[in-house]
Image (cartoon, helix red, strand yellow):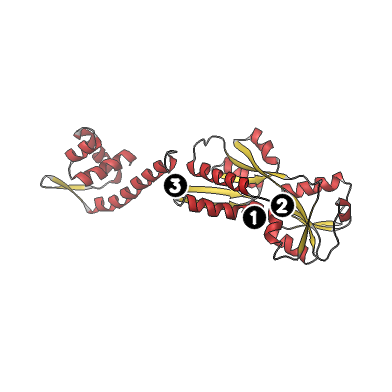
Amino acid sequence: MDFLQLQTFKAIVDEGSVLGAAEALHCVQSNVTARIRALEHTVGVKLFHRQGRRLQLTPSGRTLLGYADRILALAREAGAALNPENEPSGDFSLGAIESSATSRLPAVLARFHAAYPKVRLNLVTDTSLNLLDEIQHGRVDAALIAGTACLEAQAQTSVVADEIYREPIVLVAPARAGRVHDASDLSGATLLMWPPGCPYRATMEQWLAANAVTPGRILSYGSYATIVACVGAGVGYSLVPRGIYLRYRQEANIVGHAMEDLAAVPNFFVRHRAVDVHPAREAFLRVMHEYVAEAQPT
């Protein structure tokens, strides 16, 4: 069965006759008859029986009507969601690295849901590289990722990356530890970071190498909550996005130190190059830009 057959089927139900359906669909009666015969041939059952001058649904026709109503309604919803002139609606799948999802996104999502209640947003958290792959295969509509790896991917793949903000890095230490003045204070110390591949870990490794500092060991944990909690317990030190430090500083027994020679890490909003129009995605990006413009360091 095809979409036009279902439209014709629904028109006969609504109008009660082939003539009425033909007038509603602006076509000749023979087209209506041919479409219904083709539909009945496809499903293998009769959908109407004649009662006087009107066509009445058979039991099989009543069953199909429920599905036809849902399919046609979903098609109308899809058309409305894709129309840039309409209020954004429908499904929007957003990916984000954990640092963004934990620190910046909650406030942005609150604004977005309040402004666009018809959008059903699904949030997926993963690494930057995995999210790039998700976008290329159409499994997410957009993502917030970090690091210059996405710029390299931009030239080689179907992904477009636009820098949206730069995330400062904060060195976090146990509250009872002495002040960390520069990278040399971490010589021989235990560091806690995300596993290799994390752009913030790469920034840390480059910073230590530039200062000829060798840490005692680097422990790899895939959770900022765990990393910060371990720092507070005295296990070691870490370098985390400033948003993560601000998120956990009230509840963890930590202090933060800004290092002047630690470069901020660029964060990017990425999408598939071939998807030019996506009203919900563009609405989210507007809200994100507004939030970033208004956010002030605290």
Residue 87 x %, y %: 43, 44
Judging depth in this view, the residue of 233 and 253 nearest the camera is 253
Alpha-carbon span between mark 3 and mark 2: 33 Å
User: In terms of image quadrants, where is residue 141?
Assistant: top right
Q: Dot 3, how many residues are within 10 Å of its Cα: few (below 14), some (14-19), or many (20+)?
A: many
* First-in-chain label (3 vs 2): 3
Judging depth in this view, the residue of 103 and 64 nearest the camera is 103
Specify whether residue 14 is in view. yes
Marks 2 and 3: in contact by CB < 8 Å?
A: no
Q: Which residue is mark 3?
A: 89
Furthest residue toward left:
52
Q: Secondary structure at mark 2?
A: strand
Type of amino acid at the residue the image marks with label 1 = Ser
Residue displayed at 57% across by 51% down: 108
Type of amino acid at the residue the image marks with label 3 = Ser
In this picture, residue 121 sits left or right of residue 178: left
Callout count: 3
Q: Which residue is mark 1?
A: 103
* First-in-chain label (3 vs 1): 3
Type of amino acid at the residue the image marks with label 2 = Pro
Q: Dot 1, how many residues are within 10 Å of its Cα: few (below 14), some (14-19), or many (20+)?
A: some
Judging depth in this view, the residue of 86 and 220 nearest the camera is 86
Alpha-carbon span between mark 1 and mark 2: 9 Å
Q: Which mark is residue 19?
A: none
Marks 2 and 1: in contact by CB < 8 Å?
A: yes
Q: Which mark is residue 241?
A: 2
* First-in-chain label (1 vs 2): 1
Quadrant of the image containing the N terminus: top left
Residue 256 x %, y %: 77, 57
Residue displayed at 11% across by 44% down: 53
Q: Secondary structure at mark 1?
A: helix
Alpha-carbon span between mark 3 and mark 1: 26 Å
